[in-house]
Image: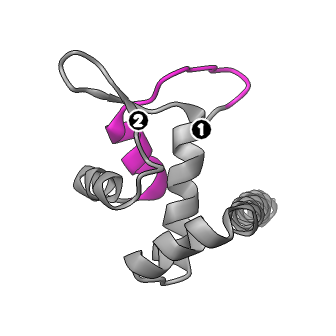
């Protein structure tokens, strides 16, 4: 989401939801279930997510959507083994990025 060309400080809930392919309502629900997810809000209660907030959402997404943990188990994992969970989420993001690059290379080679 944070490319070298664009250095945004804040992202909207719509942008974050699109990044993970989830509904905005799910992100709002996760905020009630995980105290770690608390984006800044403006006077109009518009959520503003920083890159750090997006990384935290990525960790929750990895536990709940990718690995299939129930919310209570995901909360327990975050509380008991935060460092291990963070590393696991980073590895997953790297692997997804590599996969996407390889798929793009394959598409380009198929055109030749």
The foreground one among 29 and 23 is: 29
Residue 95 in the image: x percent, y percent? Answer: 76, 66
In this orientation, which residue lies closer to the viewer: 33 or 19?
A: 33
Q: Looking at this rendering, what residue extends furthest in the top direction?
A: 43
Instruction: Name the image quarter holding the N terminus.
Output: top right
User: Is residue 42 located in the magenta-colored stretch of the structure?
Assistant: no
Question: Separation of disc 1 and disc 2 at Cα?
Answer: 9 Å
Q: What residue lies at 59% left-to-right and 38% top-to-bottom?
A: 52
The answer to whether 73 appears left or right of 88 in the picture is left
Q: Label 1: few (<14), some or many (≥20) within 10 Å?
A: few
Q: Quick check: is 17 in the magenta stretch?
A: yes
**The C terminus appears in which quarter of the rendering?**
bottom right
Where on the picture, by quarter, is residue 96?
bottom right
Q: Which residue is tagged 2?
A: 39
Q: Residue at x 80, y 59 (%)?
A: 105
Residue 33 is marked as none
Q: Is residue 87 above or below residue 73?
A: above
12 relative position to 52: left or right: left
Q: Classify residue 100 as left or right of residue 15.
A: right
Q: Residues within 10 Å of mark 2 (few under 14, many from 20)?
A: some
Camera-side residue: 66 or 103?
Answer: 66
The spot of residue 21 in percent (x, y) is 41, 59
Q: Is residue 3 above or below residue 70?
A: above
- Residue 101 appears at what percent x and percent y? 76, 57
Give the mark count: 2
Query: Considering the numbered disc 2 on the image, is that residue within a helix, a strand or a loop?
Result: loop
- The region drawn magenta spans 3-21
Q: Nearer the viewer, residue 60 or 92?
A: 60
Disc 1: which residue: 52
Q: Which element type, helix, strand or loop, lies under badge 1?
A: helix
The location of residue 62, given as percent across then percent down, is 56, 69
């Amino acid at each position: 989401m944070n490319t070298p060309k664009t250095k945004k400080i804040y992202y909207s809930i719509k942008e974050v939801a699109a990044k993970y392919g989830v509904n905005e309502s799910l992100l709002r629900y996760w905020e009630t279930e995980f105290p770690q997810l608390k984006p800044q809000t403006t006077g109009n209660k518009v959520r503003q997510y920083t890159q750090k907030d997006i990384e935290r959402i990525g960790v929750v997404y990895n536990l709940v959507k990718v690995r299939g943990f129930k919310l209570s188990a995901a909360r327990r994992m975050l509380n008991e083994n935060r460092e291990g969970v963070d590393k696991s989420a980073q590895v997953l993001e790297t692997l997804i990025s590599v996969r996407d690059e390889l798929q793009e290379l394959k598409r380009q080679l198929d055109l030749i």
